[in-house]
Image (spheres, coloured by chain):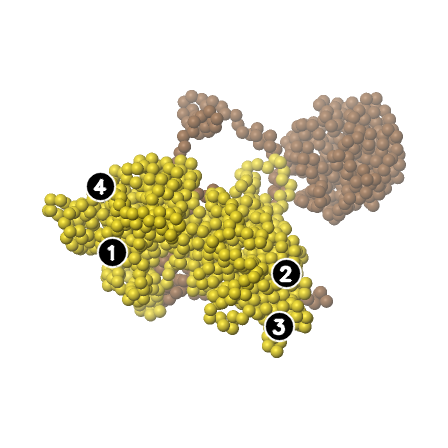
Chain colours: A yellow, B brown
Amino acid sequence: MRVRIPEAGAHVRKDGERKREGEGGEGGEGGGERRRGEEDEGQGNRGGGKGEEQEGEGEQGGEKNDQGRKGGETVKEGGKKSSGGQHRRDDGRGRRDGPGSGREPRTERVHAAVCFSRDGKKMLTSWASHVEVHSTLSGKKMFALEGHTRQVSGISLHPFNVSQAFTSSLDGCLRLWDVSDGTDLKVWSLPFPINSFVLSSDARLAYVAMVKEGDGKGKEGGKKSSGTVNVVDLETGRQKLDFLLLARTCILTSVQRLFKTRTPAKLSITADGNTLFAVTGRDLLLFYTDSADDDKRKPVELRHARDVVAVTCHPEGKFVAVGDERGEIFLWFNVLHDKSGVSDPPVCSKHNMHWHASAVRCMGISEDGAYLLSAGNEGVLVMWQLETGYRQFLPRLGGPVNAMAVSSCGTVVAVLCEEQNVQLVNLLTRKIVKTLRLLPIPSEGTKGGADDSSSFASILGIEPRHGHVLLNPRGTTLQIWDSVNGKHVQSLEVVNRNTISQAPIHAEYGKAKRPVDPNPRILQLAVSSDGEHLAVVHGPRPSQEDKGVEGDDSSAGAFFQLSFWRLTDGMFQALTRIVNPHNGRVGTLTFNPVNQSVVSAGFDGNFKLWTLSSRDLGMAPPSRSGKEAKAREALPTSTWKCTAVGSYRQVPCRASCFSPDGTLLAIAFYCNVTVWTSEPLELKKVLSHASVTEPIETLLFLPSSPSLVAASRFTVAVWNLLSCSLSWAFDVSSCGLVAHPSRPEFAFSVAADDVSFILRCNASSSVPSQVWKVPKTSKLFSPHGHGSSFLAYVWDAESGRDNAWLTVAGRGGFHRVDGEGREEEHKEREIMVEEEAGRASMFSLAFGAGKKGRKQRKQQRLLDASKKEDSSLTHDILSAPAHGESVEEEDRGG
Amino acid sequence: MAEHGDGFRKLEMQRAPRAPEASTPEQRHWRRYKTSLVTKAYAAVHCVAFSPAAPYDFAVTNSTRVQIYGSRGKAVKKTISRFKDIVYTTSFRDDGKLLVAAGEERIVKVFDVESGGMLRMLKGHSKPVHSCGFSRDRLHCISGGDDAVVKYWDVATGEETMNLEGHKDHVRCVTTSPTSQDVVVSGSYDHTVKLWDCRKGASVLTVDHGGPVQAVLMLPGGGVMVTAGGNVMKVWDVLAGGRVLHAMANHSKPITCLAYDENGGRILSGSLDHHLKVYDVQEYRVRYSLDYQQPILSLGFSQNQSTIAVGMANGLLNVRSRPTEEEKLSKVKAKKNPRGGTFQYFIRGQYDKANEEDDFRVERIRKQKLAPYDKMLKKFPYGTALDAALRTTNPLIIASLLHELYVRDCARIALSGRDDTTLIPILKFICKYISVQTYTSLLTDVSNTILELYTVIIGRSEAVDELLWKIRMRVHEQLMMDANLVALQGSLELILASTLH
């Protein structure tokens, strides 16, 4: 049985209707950061003919075509432009390339879940592979339900046992927990990842939507995943010892497939458990679980014009609400199974419920069924009064909303945002009553998304006072996170501007250019050694295309700001803001470890020295008063000023570093390292070598040793500053170079195919003293305030399991500080410690894997400083760096 | 903390970095002294002396009389004219009850300030007296005259108790130490400043100023002494045996008088070059300078920092004053109960502020007030927002909005779809500000966008064409100017280089 939406009325809109709605409904607070391109409200109104006229002209002009199309795109984003024809055409196109035609998936799958306990005092929130239980009264984390190995995809309370809850995960397990103390009660192991699940009213059956990963046999070779909806019997089933889950008994039970779906489905079920709703592809499927005869056990397909992505149903089955990928919400009535046999087909409401500009990610229904709540990418909670169509808004929830849950009392709704904070909203007052913050780690769904935001792109550094982590969860927010206690400490808005929701990705758009996030990000951050001062650079992210090219950010939108912050009364306050400190991108930002000065260097080839200077107060006569005096007192008493500008050959600069005593400053200009004295600022030496040809990205002075380490994309080189010669260098693509706080040692990580290695090196020898194998997604950090140890942050995005601060201490011992602050000595099974003995094989392993296709660099180039005849020559050459490279190359060739 | 869920954030103004402040707080402080009295007397005003006690009246000598002005020179309270010749000097006792004055007459006279009656006549000087004062014990008087003698008088008996002889030329200034009642300081035209011990009756310290000494000042604490002679001012460390701490030559003509601002820690000096300068006592740098019409002969500064009185050579007296804190407070009128039936009566209490402790305050939710362009930004019609910003004619707002539009990557949307009437304000703005350095880069981008969008309609509207032409000319002018400046810089460097070698 297939039902079509009558005359496609749900998605073809009339001009007048849209405009009226736009003006009237928005009101004061509704606007929020809603969508871009909505400006045609104004423009379209002013002169209907104008837009068309201009489009026509664009075609005349030939090269203006681009403009015309651009206009069209914006229209489609908003879904609001006057040109209805355009819209229909667009829809037509959408219909042509059906789900099977290898079209790129329009919306990324997001797995997140949030759920209230029955009494509303606890809240269960998915956090990667864990479920965290927070108290809604105090906002504190109580415990975590750990057991799943991949992203949790669903949480559901037990229908009648108030202290139990089911969770599902992409690892294919369904687990039952005791929510009062966090014990793991039962595990059902299913053959495929679970995308979504619902329980029957007696909790004997679970309906599970599973993901069948594609086998790469799609038309264009793309991996497409389809899905199935199955019923799982929770009562029967035999227990089995699962070796994968390590001595946990899990239950293998009968899984009966109900129907197949083209894409992994999302499920919803009525309170009596008789009607199951699933959204998949463009269809809403109704499945009557209570129908007896087999031929009726086929789902009813309700076809929509676009992919539908969210579903929720009225508990009594009065209606079911479906949200599609462009933000339109449809209500279907008459969906219950009519046992009398006289079945009217389900009908779609004629109400136009289109506010969201991009996909509706989650929906909820208030207890009385009078209000529908929806939220999505815009970060706005929309409350629809279903009787009247009246909308109310709660904007600025803080990022795209991934999941929501209505409490059983019906007045509080929990909204889980993408940056992992949970807002508890009182529906009566429409106010946020509490904010719970979890560690903001990009969920699995967004991994490898629009930008290369690996799990740590957002981790900027470590605050030296308490060892707190500085994170950039989104936009220009700087969040300070206590990693030991797992607590949110403080968040800081670096710039006071509204967040603009990202333009939705549509098929047309995806072909031309992926829309860039219009919100600036924090790009560079430096903390002073005492933790009192903070320097932050924010600006637009480098887009994918211009990543390799330097200094092309000349457009007006490319706007960078350097801001200096000082800790006053436990809060960071802005002292100085500098707009566009460099002409273009800022390559590096470093604090002097001894005094209050900062070096910033940019791709424009200049570096600047900023110092803190106090404002001249002069005689502040005691008798001053009034407005002026107050305004003056509000001004910070000290400001940061640029006191020196330097450059070397005007080549872009990416790295800088102060020596531990603050007297020397090393700045890398392309592949040359310049060494300056910091007081007075004078160029002392230029270090360059033929083996370093790539731009240097990291520089480090080693403590208690006259050595300088430089790392470019493919080389790690160590210079001796006394002889100004290269001690040694080898070709390896490194990342995350850190120095030991007291000894002349450093560590860096090398990425191989599926794991990465942390190499610990000494300044004197190119042979690593230790090598550790760690998960690929680990990142090294400089160990401010952590004694004599290296510090690595390890986050395994695949399993989401191994997220811990890894302290690499002493001789191969591991101190692993996990989320609860437990510190334990580990000889970890997945972290293999190889001592010096096995270094030869290990090298080939690490380097061979890292540099496939770079044959000429493959051999390890060791340059031993002990070669006396070489070093004197090198020294001379280094003194005249402009001509050094070719001579050096010849010499070595001979 | 800026939590999520707080209100709409208004458009952030892209202010250019602030230039160094045009005025320092110090300058603003001294500028607050407004001229409150300028009078012309018969002859030069040789001395201005402030009473050290409230209400800080001051005495002014001119010709053969001493006039006592009320604080800030509002009116002459008293005129003492019991002199037969020119009065050169006067001084109050530190309780403000007695006044001593002397001059060409060679007699030092003591007056009761309250009644104006003369109490004592101290005769002994053989030549005109140029400086006099009370000692710290209130019982003695000191005076120095052209006969090169400093005399120490007992006021009660009217007898001369001590004759401090040692100067070789006219004594021009005498003062007492603020800490010790036995130390008297005198400066003379013989270039020396002597510290006298009244117990011994002899000089204990002599320093050579290097010029005829006109004025001497002991700073509170008694350890530091400031002398003025010629156009040089010197600061001495008395305790270290007369070491020069600092020498300042900021005046172009001889310094005639000194005063000290105790609360602010500032030295004031007046000179014949018409200037009054203010020095701080940390670095002894000039912090402020005041101009007068005539050579300054005398200077007084009230202890409550409210008044500067300056006497000048041709008899002008200039009084500058500023309201003090107490006066400001007293200006706040006590509330009267309004008469019944008046308008005030009916609105009484309406604007009274709630008592913080006792009253329960009902929270009122204030609606955020947004400017028109902010309202539009909130609702996203960017074109309308730009129009609203242009209507404000504030370049800062317009530039900030344009910048925000570029950051949001929707400047094209805001700029497109305009006809000539809506395009002209933007073009006018560009034309006006494209050569202003802070807006140049932004407006270059805006004009590029506009040219990209509207090239095809060039020639359809005269006004638009004219403006585009104007912008072109403006850019051209600017480029020419840049070229000229570069040339100028080159020639300047040439000159500078040649002077160096």
Q: Chain of mark 1?
A: A
Disc number lying in front (3 or 4): 4
Q: Earlier in the sequence, mark 3 or mark 4?
A: 4
Would residue A740 be visible to someone looking at this image? yes
Q: Are marks 1 and 4 in contact (CB under 8 Å)?
A: no
Label 2 element class: strand
Closer to the chain start, of discs 3 and 1, is: 1
The chain ID associated with circle 3 is A
Picture residue at 58% right of the left edge, 63% below the top: A767
Residue position for label 1: A261
Q: Residues within 10 Å of mark 4 (few under 14, many from 20)?
A: few
x and y, in percent, of residue B96 in the image = 72, 26
Quadrant (top left/top right/bottom left/bottom right) for the C terminus of chain B: bottom right
Residue placed under numbered mark 4 in the picture: A272
Q: Between disc 2 and disc 4, whose residue precedes?
A: 4
The foreground one among A114 and B98 is A114
Closest to the camera, between mark 2 and mark 4, is 4
- For label 2, the residue is A707
Q: Is residue A398 left or right of residue B105?
A: left
